[in-house]
Image: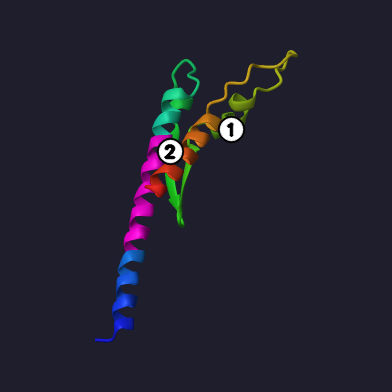
Amino acid sequence: MDIADEITKALSEYSEEVAENLEAIKKEVAEDTVELLKRTSPRGRRGKYAKGWRLKKEGTGYYVYNATDYRLTHLLERGHAKADGGRTKAQPHIAQAEREAIEKIGVRIQT
């Protein structure tokens, strides 16, 4: 067998292994982010918003989104104007979860 064929085969196997590991890391970090958002999201009377966080795989990425109250995400994260004047207090929770996910994935990929 030719040495070039052996090298190509070894690199192909390594590439597949790296891709599988990266996929596992992405999924695990996304799942952790969903759980973090469920714990840290503001809770109303029934906690519907906090329970609404989901994970969806599209193409090569995982997306974390709120399935029950997606319209509230930016209003709660940044605050909003009230009908009778004034503003509500911002309740940041998404930005922190995003920062932690970015940090986790960077650490996990390097190891």
CA–CA distance in space, label 1 to label 2 = 15 Å
Which of the image's four quarters has the N terminus?
bottom left
Q: Which residue is mark 2?
A: 54
Please report the bounds of the magenta region as a residue range: 16-33
Residue in the picture at 40% in, 41% down: 29
- In the picture, measured across the screen, residue 44 lies left or right of residue 12, that is right
Residue in the picture at 52% in, 35% down: 99
Residue 30 within the segment the image draws in magenta: yes
Q: Is residue 103 above or below residue 50?
A: below
Given residues 38 and 47, the one toward you in this image is 38
**Which quadrant of the view contains residue 92?**
top right
| Magenta stretch: dominant secondary structure | helix
Provide residue 100's location: percent of width, then percent of height: 47, 34
**Which quadrant of the view contains residue 77?**
top right
Given residues 73 and 93, the one toward you in this image is 93
Q: Secondary structure at mark 1?
A: helix
Q: Residue furthest left?
A: 1
Q: Residue 71 has which mark? A: 1
Dot 2 alpha-carbon crowd within 10 angstroms: few under 14, some 14 to 19, many 20 or more: some
